[in-house]
Image: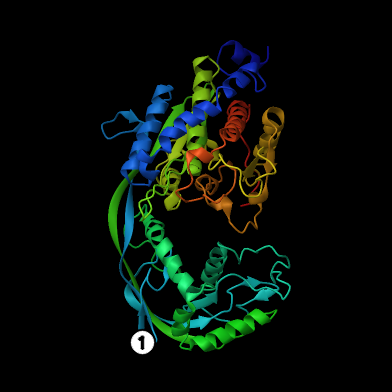
Amino acid sequence: MTSQQLLLAAGLISLPFASIAQEKFANSITAADLEKHLRILAADDMEGRETGTRGQRKAADYIATQFATEGLKPIVKETDGKLGYLQPYTLYKKNWGDFYVSAGGKRFEPQKDFMPNGLLYLPTETTYETVFVGYGIGESNYDDYAGRDVKGKAVVVLDDEPKAADGKKLVSGTSDASKWGGPNGWRAKSILAKEKGAAQLFIVSAESAEAFKQLLTQRSAMQARFNRLSLKPGAENVGSVGVFLITSDMAAALLNTSVATLNQTITQLAQSTKPIASSLTGSIAMKADRVDEKTESSNVLGFIEGTDKKDEVLVVSSHYDHIGISADGQINNGANDDGSGTVSVLEIAQAFAKAKAAGKGPRRSILFLTVSGEEKGLLGSQYYADMSPVIPLEKTVADLNIDMVGRVDDIHLGKSDNYIYVIGSDKLSSELHKISEETNKKHINMELDYKYNDPQDSQRIYYRSDHYNFAKHQIPIIFYFNGLHPDYHKPTDDIEKIDFKLAEKSARLVFYTAWEIANRDQRLVVDSNKQ
């Protein structure tokens, strides 16, 4: 007999990958059970599951109860030495203290005159020279920074990106937005500004003054919540580049010019096919103080111990937090984001628990990890991976992360409901990518869409969910995602809009992939770095 046959006979490993038993356990993941869990987690009494709130704690207790019911082991050491399912951690809420920008004899304030993005910390008033740098783009065919020294200066740039007379984008040469345009263009511009040595970045909104005021009103409450929590107290962001969305009126004051002159320069840029060297400069004084306030949160962990390879661990993850209650009192239930991923983890955990109870448990151990703090900047998974991994990262073979798998996105609406975006499968391990494709072809046969796996993805989806805190440690990952939709981060992301058959199919795909990773002879090899 082969070594694998001996192990099978001794009951030390599971049945082979293609076994009938495996299909039986996969089929225990059902649309009905997914809906049962989601009707609880996405109900109004969970209050939107915002990190650090009563609703988030209530959701954590529900998940922990489910793990216990299914027989998953608690693995977190509690203060009394016992083991539990909750991994508590402290967050520091970064409330703004004294925060202003002064220029041209005027004092501008956040949420009233401009919208800050990030956790800038500037405890004492500091002065900067300001300089206008067009669209803030740095490409071989369109470089606003060519010949410009912006080190230590506050850079003022325009929102979006330049277009030709026919409407095509000058950078890409197509009608599609490059990474410099669209709603996330500020990310590329802020990264480049920092690389160039800029101290601050002010982005001039393309909206009218009235529309900008409405935008401030709509987003002020959300902005007050987002990017305000940190795993560390104090001034860890000293020296970071602040990013501010401002009006043309404020931009004119920052550049010591009139609105008419600034608009004339903007018009010239819009009519040109190449950057225009502008002499607009000015000076500002600004201060951005912060005050820390402690808040508590927790991840929820359930563990299934493996057999002959139990020291190697596969992580299956999702985030269970959402964005809570809006300023107008509406509850953001987050049925899809990420209730759909969380209930998928619960069902996959149940399927593996059934397999173990039947004597066919996985060879490698599996950690089912549901985290909070994702909506605040991937903080729960960062705490686990960077500060307190319950299982050493060197023993972690992969992370399969599930985030928003219950809706058909705008791209596929009316065309297909048999797809899943697969992100990151090839970035660290060619074996993982091959396993993913072969598993899907053999068992599920969904369309694996790699749109967001593109390194040039303007929305940078690869960096926006919890798998990334594993990937940055060179742990292979797959991020399963069904795309964005009009109800994203809105009170209308409710359970009535969830496609549970799609969620069932996606969860079964993750289960089959996890089964193969957990039961194969060799650990996944890390043989590439395409991040």
Q: Does residue 140 appear in the picture of this structure?
A: yes
Residue 373 horizontal/vertical position (percent): 41, 47
Q: Say above or below: 476 vs 239.
A: above
Q: Say above or below: 145 vs 119.
A: below
Which quadrant of the view contains residue 290? bottom left
| Residue closer to the observer: 17 or 38 | 38
Badge 1: how crowded within 10 Å, few (<14), some, or many (20+)?
Answer: few
**Which residue occupies 30% across, 28% down?**
82
In the rendered image, the residue lying farthest to the left is 80
Q: Which residue is the site of mark 1? A: 105
Q: How has the structure been colored for display?
A: rainbow
Q: Is residue 217 left or right of residue 474?
A: left
Residue 488 horizontal/vertical position (percent): 51, 50
Q: Say above or below: 253 vs 490.
A: below
Q: How many marks?
A: 1
Q: Secondary structure at mark 1?
A: loop
- The N terminus, quarter of image: top right
Q: Does residue 88 appear in the picture of this structure?
A: no
Q: What's the amino acid at mark 1?
A: Gly
